[in-house]
Amino acid sequence: MVTVQGWRHKTGLWEPNKLVRVVSRSLNLDGELLIVSATYGLDEGGTITDLDLCDRRAFELIELPEVEDSVWN
């Protein structure tokens, strides 16, 4: 999870199913991740958004091998 200040970025609200660029030297990461969920918060410090992120390839469909005819088909 990543926490960002505010509910918005340059073009609108932080929303699921959008790609976001993440740069983190400590994680050796510089690339786009998919927003899985966004949780908006408000407290005495202002507005924040918690973003659950993952590699977009996690949602790519994999090709299943064709099943050969057998007794069970």
Image (tube, helix red, strand yellow):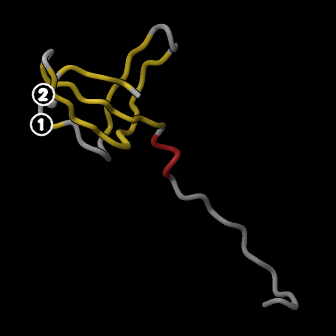
Asked if residue 70 lies left or right of residue 29, the reply is: right
Pick the front one: 46 or 68: 46
* Amino acid type indicated by mark 1: Gly
Q: Residues within 10 Å of mark 1 (few under 14, many from 20)?
A: few
Q: How far across and down, in percent of the image, does residue 14 sit?
A: 21, 36
Identify whether 41 is placed above or below 65.
Answer: above
Residue in view at x 36 percent, y 24 percent: 2
Classify residue 43 by image quadrant. Answer: top left
Which residue position is annotated with label 2? 10
Pick the front one: 68 or 23: 23
Residue in view at x 24 percent, y 29 percent: 49
State the residue lying farthest toward the front.
44
Which residue position is annotated with label 1? 12
Disc 1, disc 2: CB below 8 Å? no
Alpha carbon distance from label 1 to label 2? 6 Å
The number of numbered discs placed on residues in the rendered structure image is 2
Q: How far across and down, in percent of the image, does residue 22 sit?
A: 37, 22
Pick the front one: 34 or 37: 37
Identify whether 40 is placed above or below 26.
Answer: below
